[in-house]
Image (tube, grey):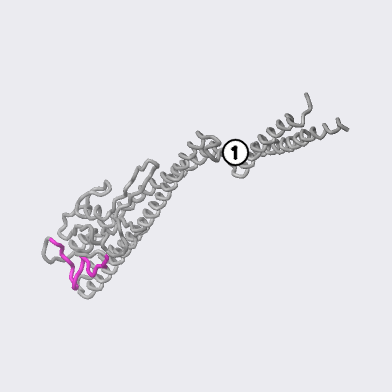
């Protein structure tokens, strides 16, 4: 090989090798700093495209999971309220039963009637306040001025937009109290002359047949059992009293309690559905995230070994270029 001061082939090869090593070293450093073997389409167009689509699904599933959490909180809030209402209804039954022991005392009947009305006010207050982010499943009205915007709960259960709706219970309760079935339960008997059918869309106590003529957002001021120191006879007969009337009144409250227990059963079923979908949604999110990682995450042990190797090659390439560049200086010795 001839010596030339115009062309230094060794230096050119050394430069090419150094540039290639430097490019690979930059890529290795990027892999280590990001933890990704595919951080852009330039690294692997197919893997990057698939990962981008899967990342979109992860974001979508995250929104689904958030919706399921909201639904779970709404159902839980309603369930808590219904359980409290059942507790108050038990007190109502106790008070209504006491009416039978005080039929000879109008003053005592009126005092008990006032107590019953107060309990019914508690029921409607609890029902109105069982609102979560504008959704109330038992109030029966969106015109109470208390921020209730919907009586139905709708939520997405999957990435493809599958939707589930929990219909508000107020109308179903009123239908049950009118003799229809609810949640697969046998219909309540309304043959009694006293029995009060429910009216949907005003208040929960109206739907349960415990008050009448209620206004959305306003507590009741009377009850269907007693007024002005006398027992109410009901809508289909004149005045009456005695054990038959009290028995019918107790049956009214028991039917109301039964209607609310059917609501708890439905809420329990919806809770299980939401819980299962939440677990499934979390699993889907994990699987998608793992899939993205398999496509794009770097093997850090391999990346570390590669970086060390490239750093060594870089040092050798620089040394080789230094030696190649010194060849032109060696030509001077020929002319000394």
- Label 1 sits on a secondary structure element that is loop
Q: Position of residue 229 (x, y in %)?
A: 19, 73
Q: Specify the farthest residue to the left.
A: 238
- The residue pinned by badge 1 equals 298
Q: Residue at x 32, y 59 (%)?
A: 86
Which residue range is magenta in the image? 217-235
Q: Residue 228: within the magenta?
A: yes
In the rendered image, the vertical position of residue 25 relative to residue 220, given as above or below: above
Q: Position of residue 100 (x, y in %)?
A: 22, 66
Give the total number of marks visible in the rendering: 1
**Structural crowding at the residue carrying mark 1, measured as other residues with C-alpha within 10 Å and reported as few (<14), some (14–19) or many (≥20):** some
Q: Residue at x 20, y 50 (%)?
A: 180
* In the foreground, 181 or 274: 274
Which SS does the magenta portion mostly show?
A: loop
Q: Position of residue 19 (x, y in %)?
A: 67, 36
In the rendered image, the vertical position of residue 332 relative to residue 209, given as above or below: above
* In the foreground, 103 or 147: 147
Quarter of the picture holding the C terminus:
top right
Q: Specify the farthest residue to the top.
A: 1
Residue 300: which quarter of the image? top right
């Amino acid at each position: 090989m001839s010596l030339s001061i115009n062309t230094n082939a060794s230096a050119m090869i050394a430069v090419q090798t150094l540039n290639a090593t430097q490019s690979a070293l930059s890529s290795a450093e990027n892999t280590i700093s990001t933890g990704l073997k595919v951080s852009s389409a330039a690294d692997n167009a197919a893997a990057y495209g698939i990962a981008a689509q899967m990342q979109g699904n992860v974001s979508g599933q995250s929104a689904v999971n958030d919706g399921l959490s909201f639904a779970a909180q709404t159902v839980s809030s309603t369930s808590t309220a219904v359980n409290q209402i059942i507790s108050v209804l038990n007190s109502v039954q106790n008070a209504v039963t006491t009416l039978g022991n005080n039929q000879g005392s109008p003053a005592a009947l009126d005092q008990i009637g006032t107590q019953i009305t107060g309990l019914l006010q508690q029921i409607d207050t609890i029902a109105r306040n069982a609102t979560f982010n504008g959704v109330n499943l038992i109030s029966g009205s969106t015109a109470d001025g208390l921020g209730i915007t919907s009586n139905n709960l709708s939520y997405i259960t999957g990435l493809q937009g599958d939707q589930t709706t929990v219909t508000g219970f107020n109308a179903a309760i009123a239908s049950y109290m009118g003799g229809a079935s609810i949640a697969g339960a046998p219909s309540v008997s309304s043959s009694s002359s006293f029995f009060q059918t429910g009216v949907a869309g005003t208040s929960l106590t109206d739907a349960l047949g415990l008050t009448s003529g209620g206004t959305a957002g306003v507590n009741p001021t009377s009850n269907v059992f007693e007024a002005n120191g006398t027992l109410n006879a009901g809508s289909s007969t004149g005045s009456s009293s005695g054990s038959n009337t009290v028995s019918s009144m107790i049956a009214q409250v028991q039917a109301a309690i039964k209607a609310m227990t059917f609501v708890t059963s439905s809420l329990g079923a919806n809770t299980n559905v939401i819980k299962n979908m939440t677990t499934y949604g979390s699993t889907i999110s994990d699987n998608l995230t793992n899939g993205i990682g398999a496509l794009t995450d770097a093997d850090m042990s391999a990346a570390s070994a590669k970086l060390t190797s490239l750093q060594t090659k870089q040092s050798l390439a620089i040394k080789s270029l230094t030696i190649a560049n010194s060849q032109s200086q060696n030509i001077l010795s020929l002319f000394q």
